[in-house]
Image (cartoon, helix red, strand yellow):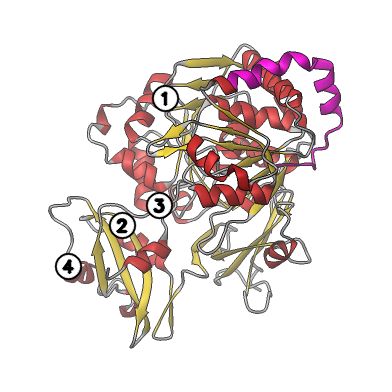
Amino acid sequence: MTEPSYAHGTGATALLGDTIGRSLDRTIDAYGEREALVDVVSGRRWTYAEFGRDVEELARALMASGVAKGDRVGIWALNCPEWVLVQYATARIGAVMVNINPAYRAHELEYVLKQAGISLLAATLSHRTSDYRALVEEVRANCPALRAVHYIGDPSWDELTSAAGSVTPQQLATREAGLSCDDPINIQYTSGTTGFPKGATLSHHNILNNGYFVGELVAYTEQDRVCLPVPFYHCFGMVMGNLGATSHGACIVIPAPAFEPAAVLAAVQQERCTSLYGVPTMFIAELNLPGFASYDLSSLRTGIMAGSPCPAEVMKRVVAEMHMDEVSICYGMTETSPVSLQTRRDDDLERRTGTVGRVMPHIEVKVIDPATGVTLERGVSGELCTRGYSVMLGYWEQPERTAEVIDAGRWMHTGDLAVMREDGYVQIVGRIKDMIIRGGENVYPREIEEFLYGHPKIADVQVVGVPDDRYGEEILACVIPVDPADPPALEEMAAFCRGRLAHYKVPRLLEVLDTFPMTVSGKVRKIELRENHGR
């Protein structure tokens, strides 16, 4: 009899019952003289002992400024050491850190400030064309809960930290003693394609354990140095990266405030990083950088590729050319802290390129018929659901929206179409909303994208469905060519597909682009590709 598409993660290592502050204390006690944090651009460095002292100072400063347990503290900045300090300082005092996307404009900022009820905001001064101070002042009158704003690198930041002396270490210890690992500690706004985002609310228990077990599965120790070009405002950076590192005594390396492929490779070389994170588009940019071969990446052994589907050909190059023999693919979503599935360091290349891994320790996954909710047999495509310690507490002050995605059994419905293989490894075949229905046939863009990565003229590709009078939807391939002067022609691409893909899966439309529209976290905005077609 065929097994059901259900799996639960077992393991010899128990879940952590700590708060984030207590976990950090354990690491400081064990590895106080080892490096904890390096900011390559500024040259600033912290040992764990130094990092712990600065976290404690900022925690006492926040208490002095009136931040109570459960108060929301916003962080609106690109990757920098202060971002990490705020992350751990808010956790120490039981405040709820609210991650704010650095790309937000005034109306988005105002929505988050009001929806979360942020009372204190830590922000950068500017980035590229954004004047953050001006944007804050534009909306501040409409945000009555916001009583204080402190800008990193500004005298207002020094004013904040200088207040630490008015709160004693004992007062901080008393505050920490009243915290539970199940307290909400973080709100992350999911990037919806329509309407305003929802604030996924996560606890110490959610994110500390998820970061810890991601680190366990790539075998982190105090010897590891983790290069993080992925944004901290997302789970990839602050959970899989920061918490994954600090829970093992590893070092966090910040290559630049925002992703720059040359800065990443230079940081890996200079700091002798052993692990590198990125979404597929980041790895593609690094591999295609002129002079890529001149960088010494021999210190790398592992890393994580996640955030969006990982093309098999890109993964193979990362292993072969970046020395990342133990690189791991992770699958997850903000609402699940984020990782539910991960490949293992001893997996063969097929599993590490053809799947997103198997279930994490202490987590359950299943694949269901989205119409009936019935668990399907293995090998059959359906909606992936996950349950366990990692599932969010809910969307901040939106119980109705929470009930739309978390059912009565506490299963989180991901909205992703997946197939669980007989060996328990899972393949993501697309989003339910991204599935193309062409002439009655269900077409999964991921399958076509993976195939087209093998075309010699295509560096990157995204496949979407666009309206068609005859078939309902038609298949559009949006490609970035290897050589902009010699892009593939439609007939050339179609000929490449014929006889190797079913006829109804062959793209009938082609657009050649320089770049794809992206979110700050590196996900391609397919909705914009659909909307922009024909313009």
Q: Is residue 161 magenta?
A: yes
- Report, in whole angstroms, how far the alpha carbon at label 1 lies from the one at label 2: 28 Å
Q: Farthest bottom residue? A: 470
Residue that badge 3 annotates: 518
> Tag 2's secondary structure?
loop
Residue that badge 4 annotates: 492
Q: Which residue is located at x 62 percent, y 74 percent?
A: 370
**Mark toward the start of the polypeptide (3 vs 2):** 2
Segment tinted magenta in the rendering: 157-185
Task: Single out the mark in the foreground, 4 or 3.
Answer: 3
Q: Give the number of the disc on residue 453.
A: 2
Identity, as a three-letter code, of the amino acid under mark 1 = Ser
Identify which residue, 77 or 27, lies in the foreground: 77
Q: Which residue is located at x 37 percent, y 68 percent?
A: 530
- Report, in whole angstroms, how far the alpha carbon at label 4 lies from the one at label 1: 41 Å
Task: Single out the mark in the foreground, 4 or 1.
Answer: 4
**Mark toward the start of the polypeptide (1 vs 2):** 1
Is residue 470 shown above or below 139?
below
Q: Kindly indicate the quadrant of the structure image that contains residue 436.
A: bottom left
Magenta span: chief secondary structure: helix
**Mark toward the start of the polypeptide (2 vs 4):** 2
Q: How many other residues sit within 10 Å of disc 2, few (<14), some (14-19) or many (≥20)? A: some
Quadrant holding the N terminus: bottom right
Is residue 482 shown above or below 194?
above
**Mark toward the start of the polypeptide (4 vs 3):** 4
